[in-house]
Image (spheres, rainbow, N blue to C red):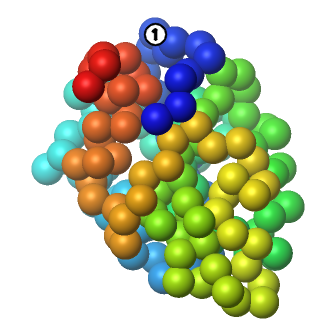
Amino acid sequence: MVEMPYPLRRSLWLYHFNSGGCNGCDIEFVATLTSKYDPERLGVQLVPSPRHADVLVVTGPVTSQSATALRAIYDQMPYPKYVLALGTCACSGGIFADCYNVLGGADKVIPVSIKIPGCPARPGTLLKALARLAGVVRNG
């Protein structure tokens, strides 16, 4: 896990970006936002605009078509901003890494704060990463 340059002392607002792929991680991400996992107890909320977001959650491998949009969304976010690469495809390109139009993981285009591998990534792992970002869990 990467050391965060600024500690967050408020709620985490998430913006989700699907850069392509099978949508398995998208389904798990949306499932994490339901009342079963209750991320609102940590102050986590999904927002419709990157201008309001603290955390950008990227799912899927970054394709040549989605790279410019991903960079533009990242540039619209205010500081401090963090990026979560959710799933193996967002971390490294996954099974799509050798395709002609896939650049690789999100770190090929923007700086990634936390990588959460898995195909698909589990909701509990995402919640643990968000809790660390929010400062609820310290050192372990």
Q: Residue at x 35, y 70 (%)?
A: 120
Quadrant of the image containing the C terminus = top left
Q: Percent x, y for residue 92?
A: 59, 66
When asked about the image quadrant of residue 56, the answer is: top right
Q: Is residue 83 above or below residue 17?
A: above
Name the one closer to the observer, 86 or 139: 139
Task: Report helix, strand or loop for mark 1.
Answer: loop
Left or right: where does residue 58 sit relative to residue 68? Answer: left
Q: Percent x, y for residue 116?
A: 43, 52
Residue 13 shows in the view: no
Q: Which residue in the structure is indicated by mark 1?
A: 9
Q: How many labels does the image show?
A: 1
Name the one closer to the observer, 2 or 41: 2
Q: Residue at x 29, y 41 (%)?
A: 127
Q: Percent x, y for residue 5?
A: 62, 17
Residue 118 shows in the view: yes
Please tell me how crowded label 1 is: few (under 14), some (14-19), or many (20+) other residues with Cα within 10 Å: few
**Label 1 sits on what residue type?**
Arg
Left or right: where does residue 3 sit relative to residue 80? Answer: left
